[in-house]
Image (cartoon, coloured by chain):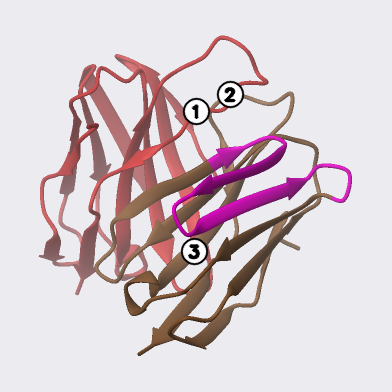
Amino acid sequence: DVKVTQSSRYLVKRTGEKVFLECVQDMDHENMFWYRQDPGLGLRLIYFSYDVKMKEKGDIPEGYSVSREKKERFSLILESASTNQTSMYLCASSLWGPAALISYEQYFGPGTRLTVT
Amino acid sequence: KNEVEQSPQNLTAQEGEFITINCSYSVGISALHWLQQHPGGGIVSLFMLSSGKKKHGRLIATINIQEKHSSLHITASHPRDSAVYICAVKNSGGSNYKLTFGKGTLLTVNP
C-alpha cells in the first residue's frame, strides 16, 4: 500500500514564525503535491513537484515555498506565517506519465491542521 | 464560476437508502476522480474513470462524457459512509498532474 505521511497532525504557530511542513511517501512516486483545504473553497493546489529539485507553482503559491531534495520527501515552507494561512494542509503523491492525456490516482497524507495565532 | 460543480452540497439519508451525488464540469477532460474524506482529514481515492461505469462494493461511479456529468451512487447506505465526497477532473491536453476539485458533498447517514 502507498503510504504518505505528514510530520504533524496539528500545529500551532505564531504570526511571523517560519513554519516547515514535511511530507514523505514510500512508493517511489515522481509527483508530489501540496494543497490547502478551506471550508467552502475546497482543495487548492499550492505547489507541485515532478522530480527532485523541480517545482511548479499551483493556484495559490503566494506566501509559500517548497523544497524537494530527495524523491520521497517534499517540504512546504511558510517563510513568515500569517493568520490567513490557518488551514488544513494536505500532501499527495502520484506516478508521473509522459502524455498529457494520462491521469494518475493521487494518494493523500492525513493532513496537518495549522493554526497561526 | 467553478469548473467543477457538485450537487447537493449537503445530503442527509437514513441507513439503507440509495444515494446519488452529482458532478458537472465545464471543460474537456481526460479523467474524473471521486474521492472520500472522513472527519479528521484523510482523503482516499474511490474511483478514476474516463468513460462508462465502475463498481466497487456498494459504490458505483458513472460518467457521461458528452453531457460532462458524473454520478456517484451508494447502495444500501450505512452510517460509516458518512463523509465528504469530492469530485475532481483532469483537463484534457493540459499537464498530466493538475486536478480541478469540486467543493465536496457532505453526506450524513443516520442509523
Q: Residue furthest right?
A: B66
The numbered dot on residue A104 is: 1
What residue lies at 25% left-to-right and 46% top-to-bottom? A109
Residue type pointed to by label 1: Tyr
* Chain letter for the part of the structure drawn in red: A
Q: Position of residue A18 (x, y in %)?
A: 16, 50
Q: Position of residue A70 (x, y in %)?
A: 19, 17
Chain letter of disc 3 in the image: B
Q: Do the residues indicated by labels 1 and 3 lie within the same chain of the protein?
A: no
Q: Are marks 1 and 3 in contact (CB under 8 Å)?
A: no
Q: Do the residues indicated by labels 2 and 1 lie within the same chain of the protein?
A: no
Residue type pointed to by label 2: Asn
C-alpha distance separating marks 2 and 1 = 8 Å
Density class for disc 3 (Cα within 10 Å; few <14, some 14-19, many ≥20) is many
- Residue underneath mark 2: B96
Q: Which residues are magenta?
A: B48-67
What colour has chain B?
brown
* Image position of A65 (left or right of A74): right
What residue lies at 51% left-to-right and 44% top-to-bottom? B47
Residue type pointed to by label 3: Tyr
Quarter that holds the C terminus of chain A: bottom left
- Residue underneath mark 3: B85
Q: Is residue A117 above or below residue B109?
A: above
